[in-house]
Image: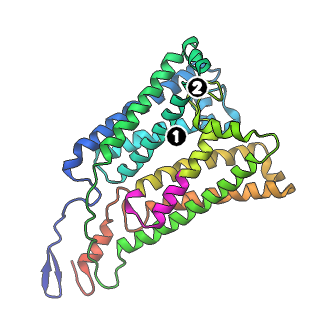
Amino acid sequence: MVMQDGGTVDVRPGPDPGRAPAEHRGAYLTTALSLLLYSGVLIAWTIYGIAQGDGNVWDFLEGLFNPGDSPTAQILGPYEWAFALAFLVIAGLALARRRVARSAALLSGFILLAVSLREGVGLFDPAYRYQYSNDSLGGWVLATRGLGLVVALVVLFALFPATERRRGGHPTAPGVDDPEAWWRRSSRICGVLFLLMCLARIGWTVRALTAPEVDTGQYLRGVVDGSVLRTLDLAAPHEFTTIGSVFVLLLLGVLAFQGRREVRGALLLFAVLELYMTVRTVVWLTVTDFFNRSFETPEGALSLATTAYALAAMTSVVVLTTGRGFGPYDGVRTEGVRAAAVGRGGGL
């Protein structure tokens, strides 16, 4: 109990604000098991790639952050490595029924669905289908693609109905910052950062598509058709990841600017993913000595500025989505509850 102005205030802990209600336990458990299964498959492919390569585990770990030091061509790419870890984390949060896992899992489901549909379009090409049947790993790759489609549908169908009405904000005493107001402000900042990153990526994509040596039709077809590159590896191609990131940055940027609390997990997931890819880029620029030559041309300087902005913006989003007023699992921090309970002139 807390004494305040001669009275008592009941501060016994109520329901955990960061935990989904028990009625959604099945949806979160199904999501966790599905993502754990697919993450295990990606890890198995990673181990297979290391075993088949010329390097060892330490070489692979260095190649995670140094694109120029990968000992051999891997079946998976950096996006798949990042998502394998992300799926494990999301699965753990879903097992704990943390609300922050919902939007992160939904975003993962949509990405898996897009990858699977792209591969499905490619299978309409007879030559591509023959490549699957003629390759020793073709059956396993196709099974992985099929599993990705199943996992995507299970996650989306399980979590979409697992919604709930927004509960009232936590009461605060005069002079104490309202956590809801703080989150709305930080959410809008995240939205602006994402939208600016989206505009920058659109600009670089348009420049790439208008280059004389680039076939625009072939590039855009590679976004939606898995048969264009004629490769069976599971690594997402540059065309797909670039256009896909533009759509995700735009969608999450708009939702975050509207102050939508439920997209917090998705913001954090994609910001961490973009931050990892940006760090890889910075390492590559360092080992290739591009930093010393970047200001020789306006394009090089602009590219370096874009990379610096991506590094700062995505770091800021990670900090804001895990920062003051909210714990890592979408609950109000203890000090916020303590301040609200004590109020002005109160005491423990």
Residue at position x 25%, y 87% in the image: 345
Left or right: 89, with 192 as reference point: left
Q: Which span is picked out in magenta?
A: 248-263
Earlier-in-chain disc, 2 versus 1: 1
Q: Which image quadrant is residue 214 in? A: top right
Task: Give the secondary structure at mark 2.
Answer: loop
In the image, residue 73 sits, relative to residue 336, either above or below, namely above
How far apart marks 2 and 1 lie (CA) works out to 16 Å
What's the residue type where badge 2 is placed?
A: Asp
Q: Magenta stretch: residue 261 in it?
A: yes
In the image, residue 204 sits, relative to residue 334, either above or below, namely above
Q: Nearer the viewer, residue 164 or 327?
A: 164
Q: Which mark is residue 233?
A: 2
Residue at position x 74%, y 54% in the image: 303
Residue 275 seen anywhere in this rendered image of the structure: no
Overall secondary structure of the magenta section: helix
Residues tagged 2 and 1 counted as in contact (Cβ below 8 A): no
Q: Position of residue 46 (x, y in %)?
A: 52, 27
The quarter of the rendered structure image containing the N terminus is: bottom left
Residue 153 seen anywhere in this rendered image of the structure: yes
Q: Nearer the viewer, residue 285 or 264?
A: 264
Q: Position of residue 205 (x, y in %)?
A: 69, 50
Q: Which residue is mark 1?
A: 82
In the image, residue 61 sits, relative to residue 259, either above or below, namely above
Residue neighbourhood size for the residue with mark 1, other residues' Cα within 10 Å, grouped as few (<14), some (14–19), many (≥20): some
Q: Position of residue 295 (x, y in %)?
A: 83, 57
Q: Which mark is residue 260?
A: none
The quarter of the rendered structure image containing the C terminus is: bottom left
Task: Give the secondary structure at mark 1.
Answer: helix
Residue neighbourhood size for the residue with mark 2, other residues' Cα within 10 Å, grouped as few (<14), some (14–19), many (≥20): some
In the image, residue 236 sits, relative to residue 233, either above or below, namely below
What's the residue type where badge 1 is placed?
A: Ala
